[in-house]
Amino acid sequence: MGMGGDNRLTRTRGLGAKHQERRAQIADALLRIIDAEGLEAVNLRQVARQAGVSMGAVQHYFRTKDEMLLFALDYVSERGGERIRARLESDSPHRVVLREVLAEFIPADDTRRAELRVSTAFLARGLVDDRVTEHVRQGYAGIHGLLTLLVRRASGAVDPEQTAVTLFALAEGLGDQVLVGHLDATAALAVLDAQLERMVAGPPRDAYAE
Amino acid sequence: MGMGGDNRLTRTRGLGAKHQERRAQIADALLRIIDAEGLEAVNLRQVARQAGVSMGAVQHYFRTKDEMLLFALDYVSERGGERIRARLESDSPHRVVLREVLAEFIPADDTRRAELRVSTAFLARGLVDDRVTEHVRQGYAGIHGLLTLLVRRASGAVDPEQTAVTLFALAEGLGDQVLVGHLDATAALAVLDAQLERMVAGPPRDAYAE
């Protein structure tokens, strides 16, 4: 899913590089715990142990569990966002970029699998916590906007907004099915490609060859 | 999502009607708590209070929190399954039935919204708990099989399996977007209808008029 809206926690405090690095180290530890045991298992003590720092250090960087969780959500979103930006700046045809961005939602490797498990945990939490809901909703809106832009560039689709919603929802649903083990990533990507074929006029399929 | 595989907990013990009713009463209380506060908030004391029974009564019916959660997942799946069976037995054209079954994944009313929130909570938990994962995976397989059958009946689709996977993933992804508040249910249903139009040859759109 790669959700999460702005990046308030990292940006608003003019944090130094060391501070940032330590926070990222703690966030990595947190993600490993969430990935292995789910959000509900997270506590400060466990995060400190996993990150190899003191309880006091964790508390120095994050006053509450919620603050830590929101930082982790931003962190996951940032990483996904960086990969997407790198793709947008590449010379690939627009339709190939669109396909690559959609494929981010399908857990085809360990990194993406871990990130998507974390995003799913947050989605579930988002449904009962207004602050997380707002974050998640902003993330959806951002992705939807980006996909609409890419669809518009890649094709003469009649309704780029609706095409973007369709492709986004499909990719996300496929991602869930792969996470749960109902589909494998290759089958999911084939379904995604067939839908692109159906909805987005563009270069011949060969353009996907790597 | 309406997930969850077999129905072991309710079937294997030859429970009397009273017993069943009491378990359903506890499951309802449990669902209300999960819907409002998420799975992690669930504990025996709170469930007993919400159901208006003693802690001992809850413990009589469910030895562990996990057993109670699995019963609730079965219970949600059962309710969804009953609605689907009723639709399968109706005289509606196959394509209308297919559309109605897919629409079950989009939270257009309070009951479905609550059930889908619960299913999403279980999906997140399923990713870290093998017993739940297996349950969820069986649920996906069952739904996929049913949708493949409906697609085959409703149309001359070239590849009913793949058509079913596509429609299922799309409906589930749309459901998530509605749950989070990014889309409203009407817009999501319009996306679903457009996809049916694209993939499943069938009676004219008027057949959906109610």
Image (tube, coloured by chain):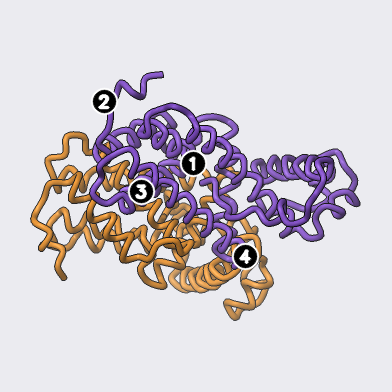
Chain colours: A purple, B orange
Front residue of A203 and A53: A203
Respond whether the residues carrying marks 1 and 2 are from the same subunit: yes
Circle 3 residues within 10 Å: few <14, some 14–19, many ≥20: many
The dot on residue A180 is 1
Instruction: Specify which label sits upstream in the sequence, 3 or 1.
Output: 3
Q: Which residue is mark 2?
A: A204
Q: Label 4 is placed on what type of residue?
A: Arg
Marks 3 & 1, CB-CB < 8 Å contact: no
Q: Which residue is mark 4?
A: A131
Identified at 33% across, 38% down, the residue is A154
Instruction: Specify which label sits upstream in the sequence, 4 or 2.
Output: 4
In the picture shown, does residue A115 fall above or below B171? above
Which secondary structure, mark 2? loop
Q: Quadrant of the C terminus of chain A?
A: top left
Q: Which residue is mark 3?
A: A164
Which secondary structure, mark 3? helix
Horizontal side of residue B82 vs A33, given as left or right: left
Respond whether the residues carrying marks 1 and 4 are from the same subunit: yes
Respond whether the residues carrying marks 3 and 4 are from the same subunit: yes
Q: Label 1 is placed on what type of residue?
A: Val
Front residue of B28 and A81: A81
In the picture shown, does residue A85 fall above or below B153? above
Foreground tag (4 vs 2): 2
Q: Label 2 is placed on what type of residue?
A: Pro
Front residue of B56 and A51: A51
